[in-house]
Amino acid sequence: MNIHFDSRAIAVHALSFLVTSVCFGQSIPGSVHQWPPPPQEVTLKAVLHHDQVAQATVLGGGREAKPEEWPASYFGNGCTWTLIGPRVLLGARHCIADGGTVYLKRDPAGVIQDLYTGKCSVSFPKLEGDISADWALCALNEAVVGENIEYEVVDLKPSRISKSKPLHLAGYGCQKPGMPTDEKFREGFSTVNFLPGYYASRKNWIETHRAIDAAGGETGAYICEGDSGGAVYVMETNGRRFVVAVNSHRDAAGHGISFLSVISSEEAKAFIEDWRQKQAALGHVTAICGLDSNVQKCRD
């Protein structure tokens, strides 16, 4: 179904947490509902050791992924997270309290002692009213290592994103909007509808939607409950992939529209730089793949 977006009022659902109303167009009038307090502690499990087999069938707009292809991805408490460096975890602001703690388990059963812990920071307080500034970074107590570990590579160049190139979404979301997650890690492409800056008051968002195939059917991925915070990728023809955003919101009407918070905006880059400076002052190592040279185990 072809959907016209300009000036159409629909609800936007913050995955797993919030419903808020916005109006489509170049400005978004109206009030924004506040998120309930996010959790202070979250325990995460690795996709790498998740018990699933990749399926060819499209499920909920995305395909079940091969766990071994996503060793830097984690899931817990209704959100998806991504390692972008040996000791750096990227997620969404509404998934963790500022100063909150994450626990990473990398064993298959997830029952042995926590191997890694980290303290998290969310985007600047001055951006609290902007739900498109939906970023969180966590500094882990030690480097996440392992035979099969590879960290995802970020790209902060705005030119990496274009309307001509679909974005690749990934996360532990549900099959249908409003349904609970079945804890399957899925991936799929989504067509870019609006680039960052289209919404005057939500300028950190990319808007994507499901595509229409030759037969008039809807294809492609959209984010759903459980996908919040998952990395959004640009996939290159040479097989490389780059993190360019995080999953933020979906439309509550279930039209397959996704809102993704870019990491290449001025606000995002300022948050990342400020976080790195504060971590450095504490003596923490926060090397990030794509921003720092000589980082070992970055995905090629």
Image: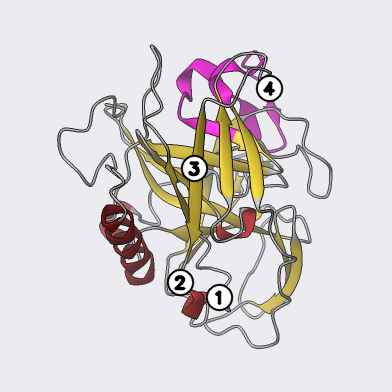
> Badge 4: few (under 14), some or many (20 or more) residues near its Cα, within 10 Å?
few
Q: Which amino acid type is shown beneath numbered disc 3?
A: Gly
- What amino acid is at disc 4? Thr
| Distance of label 3 from label 1 (alpha carbons) | 22 Å
Q: Amino acid at mark 1?
A: Glu
Residue at (58% x, 27% y) in the render: 114
Earlier in the chain: of badge 4 and badge 2, it is 4
Residue 208: x %, y % from top left: 54, 56
Query: Marks 1 and 3: in contact by CB < 8 Å?
Result: no
Q: Which residue is tagged 2?
A: 124
In terms of sequence position, does the residue under pointer 1 or pointer 4 come before the other? 4
Give coordinates of residue 76: x percent, y percent.
66, 37
- Within the image, what quadrant is residue 180 found in? top right
Are the residues flagged by discs 4 and 2 in contact, CB closer than 8 Å?
no
Which residue lies most toward the right here? 179
Q: Nearer the viewer, mark 4 or mark 2?
A: 2
Looking at this view, is 32 or 168 the one in front? 32
* Precedes in sequence: disc 3 or disc 1: 3
In whole angstroms, how far apart are the C-alphas of marks 1 and 4?
Answer: 39 Å
Q: Which residue is mark 4?
A: 57
Which badge, 2 or 3, is on the more N-terminal residue? 3
Residue 297 percent coordinates (x, y)? 29, 24
Q: Which residue is mark 1?
A: 128
**Residue 65: horizontal and vertical position, in percent?**
58, 23
Residue ID for mark 3: 118
Which region shows up in magenta?
46-74
